[in-house]
Amino acid sequence: MKILNKTLLTFFLFAFVLLIKPDLVFADASTTPLSCGNKMTVQNIEEIKNEINGASSKQIKLRILTKENFRGYYLTIQPQNNNNFESREVARVDGGRTPSGEQIYDLTFDIDPEKGLNSLDAQNKLGYGITFNADRALGLNFSFGIDPSCGIGSYYVFSSQAEKDYYDALNEVANDPLPPGSISCAGGVAITSAEGLDDVIEGTSSKRIVLNLRTSESHPGYYLKIKSSEGKEFETNKLTVAEDAARYQLTFLLTNSGLLSNESLQDLTYNVSLFSTDTTRSLCEVGQYAVKPRDVDTNNPDHYCGVTYVGSNLCIAVDGTEYEFGEAQDCPGTEINASQRQCCSVGYLQASGGTCPTSQAFGCGTWNASMATCQNSANQKISGAQSCGVDPTVCCSPDSMDLCPKSDPDPLPGGGGGGETEENPEEPPSDSIVDNLTSEKFNELNPLLMGNADGSASKYAKTLKSPGGFISRILLFAFPLAGLILFAMLSWAGFEMLAGASSEKSLDAGKQRATAAIVGFLLLFVSYWIMQIVEVIFGITIL
């Protein structure tokens, strides 16, 4: 009796484990038939135990025998790197019911080549373990219990030659010690050498930064972020690189004036950081460079000072030099007009002790006798003045050329001007053929208002005075006319159907004619009815 109890206990424990997680019992099973619980058996497995090298597609075929209807079947494929994904069934052929009431299914699964056919996560080969799963049916066939599943085997994907070369290069980089002075960065990147950093520049229009990189991880591209000691930040162009390489040389060309100019009186420092295009965090700080301040000639204010417009970020000097926001400042208390302010570069203001040039004037004035100086009414010199075309003696600053005098229009004939004039010139023709058009004159041309022979107005004059009244009058005749047309069309359709009773074509034509007549009449009635509803809703009179 005790032996029987132990046997039954062992049997029930085994059945419980099989019910909860059948793939624990058959984890290494790949032979068939393979039991996946007490409801389903895998009868046959094709194209699973093989090794793949550079394949673009793979199928796994199963034949299963099941005692229960399931909603669907799928494979769970687990690579060695534990990145699980599912391959859903793409084709299924239902088999006939067996004498025991079971069903046989032939299942075909396509493996996603991007997920199940690459070996980029291993140097030599990558194994994929496969588990077969079933979803229980819903609705009327709903049943309780654990979804059956079982491991059915595994396959291996070997690295292609290109992948092996790539891993060899990465291993070479990883094992090769960095040269002295190298900078280790995040993301497996190291900067072995750099050019164009830790120097001081002055008065240049471009700058080149060259970086030599080694990387043990793949990045699609790189760019630099450069931040000045004043807080300004700039980004360079993004450079795309080949992801299968391990060594790069990156050349960044700086042409932005904000990275190469300095309007202050002290050296301006720029810090350079390296970024990858596939991340928003800095890989590492590369270094820095400095820009010397420009030498400021306080005796030439036209190069540093000018005007700025309200709402603009530019200060335009008299000689045309442009200074961006931050490189120039407005001069306090130097309003030119409501939309213009006088401004100077920061370097000039620092060199002059914060004083803007008082000799600069803007607007319009007149040339002196030698045409060398343009002065306004306060005898101030107007900087950068230009002559006005209409009156050469008048001059204006470049920002005020729209204030130049305009040329007078040509005098009209007979308007005086030194020539002979007629004593009694003809009056110009009137703009209208009929003088003083009034509603009374238009009413005299209205036949309804002209009325009857005795001079009285027609009784329909008031009704037909507006478009709505005209349409309302027409509708009095439109509906009876529509009824007559409907009667004629129905009669025509009836005769056509009677005459062609033996012809299917004539019967169809008669039906279509009758249908069109009825629908047309209904549309006419419905449109009139809708218009009346609109009148009631909006309180207007249309018809």
Image (cartoon, grey):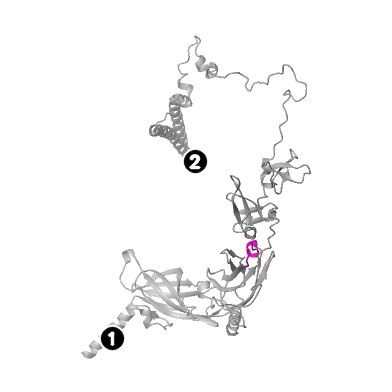
Q: Quadrant of the N terminus?
A: bottom left
Q: Position of residue 318 (x, y in %)?
A: 69, 51
**What's the amino acid at mark 1?**
Thr
Q: Nearer the viewer, residue 157 or 6?
A: 157
Quadrant hosting residue 472:
top left
Magenta residues span 256-267
Q: Position of residue 509 (x, y in %)?
A: 48, 38
* Residue at (74% x, 38% y) in the render: 391
In this image, 134 relative to 355: left or right? left
Q: Nearer the viewer, residue 341 or 104?
A: 341
Residue at the extreme left of the image, as rendered: 1
Number of marks in the rendered image: 2
Label number found at residue 505? 2
Quadrant hosting residue 432:
top right
Query: Which residue is identified by label 1?
Result: 10
Q: Does the magenta-highlighted stretch encompass residue 113?
A: no
In this image, 93 relative to 288: left or right? left
Residue 222 in view in this figure? no
Q: Position of residue 117 (x, y in %)?
A: 53, 75
Residue at the extreme top of the image, as rendered: 454
Residue 326's place in the image compared with 89, above or below, is above
Sequence order check, earlier mark of 2 and 1: 1
